[in-house]
Amino acid sequence: MVHEKLSRSPLLKADKTLTEEGWARAALWDYSRKEAKSPYLRENDGYLVADRQGGFMMLFEFAAAGMKARHRITYVDIARKECAEVESSKVSVLRHGTLPEDILSDSEMTYADQAMTMAAVKRGSKRQLLITAPYLDLPGDITGLKAHIELENSNDETISAASAEKDDGTRWCLRSIESPLTAEGIMFVGHKPVMLSPTASGAFWYSRSKLQRSIVGAMILGDGWSLCAGEDRYINSITYRGCIDKLGSMIFSRTADRWIASEENSRVEIEARPIATAGSEGNAREFISCSGSFTLSDGQRIAFSDALGIISSQIR
């Protein structure tokens, strides 16, 4: 089992290598953009909202790399198995200035251009999302998307992890994931108002890194639980009843029509079928419907079907 971090510390030493690799049940690494400053620094905040009853998923992303800022809205129609996406990129003189350094502090992020507006506001345990994409062509010959969504984190623990390349400790990745989050709000698909259903849920992920390699990672939202899994073993975990249950290494394999994922100690078996795919080669995001089971550390086995999520395979 990989090392569990128990106390707070700066993320980096004076030589810009990690102070401590491992995982934690809270955000215990203090990230400083000034200390991490590098042309290879990448920052990403992502919000996933899944509503099986409502028949949709949405992904909102704020990202920065060097002086380039990227903002993206993705809408997935589950029944039609189609998605629509709008992305805006621009050079920012503020460099990474729009993304918060500290995941725990209150923060605000905004972006607007002709194609979209995006705002994310954190106050305590709640995150407010406001988005518009008036010209986005949605599945079903509908144009325009607006949403006002509130995500709330009532979990006792949040999975966080920091790791570095074995042959170069100056290349590292820091991640924290809040999930599952309760989700409520309203969106307008075209001009039609749609309320989020009582079973809607969400996830928020925070990533700050100096890595550039292929990574496969999955976020799955179930009924009161979530599962984070990827080739990076530090982040692999189940959040069940608000607490983290750490997992070992995961193996992912892709067949013609599905993903198969399993854990090294046979605690997780997942079959994921793609609903829709967004992005391009080298930066693919597959929205998925999952079935399978996981076993908690106390031996309790949880079987599930029709859980929703996303698998990403990208160059960071």
Image (cartoon, rainbow, N blue to C red):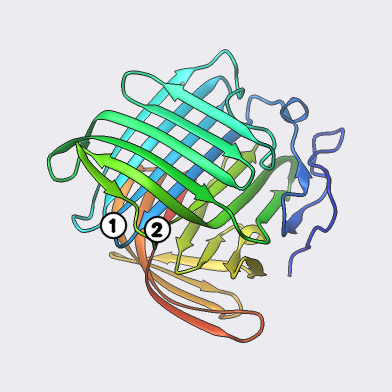
Which class describes the residues within 10 Å of circle 2: few (<14), some (14-19), or many (20+)?
many
What amino acid is labelled 1 in the image?
Answer: Gly
What amino acid is labelled 2 in the image?
Answer: Ala
For image coordinates 77% across by 49% down, the residue present is 28
Rendered view: 165 above or below 244: above
Q: For residue 199, what is the image quadrant?
A: bottom left
> To which residue does mark 1 refer?
54
For image coordinates 59% across by 52% down, the residue present is 177
Q: For residue 159, what is the image quadrant?
A: bottom right
Q: Quadrant of the C terminus?
A: top right
Q: Residue 147: x percent and y percent? A: 35, 39
> To which residue does mark 2 refer?
200
For residue 1, side relative to residue 88 (left or right): right
For residue 203, side relative to residue 194 (left or right): right
For image coordinates 85% across by 54% down, the residue present is 7
For image coordinates 44% across by 49% down, the residue present is 48
- Contact (Cβ within 8 Å) of mark 1 with mark 2: yes
Which class describes the residues within 10 Å of circle 1: few (<14), some (14-19), or many (20+)?
some
Secondary structure category for the residue under label 1: loop
Residue at the extreme top: 93
Q: Residue 274: x percent and y percent? A: 31, 60
Residue at the extreme left: 141
For residue 50, side relative to residue 191 (left or right): right
C-alpha gap between disc 1 and disc 2: 8 Å
Q: Residue 219: x percent and y percent? A: 49, 58
Rendered view: 91 above or below 226: above
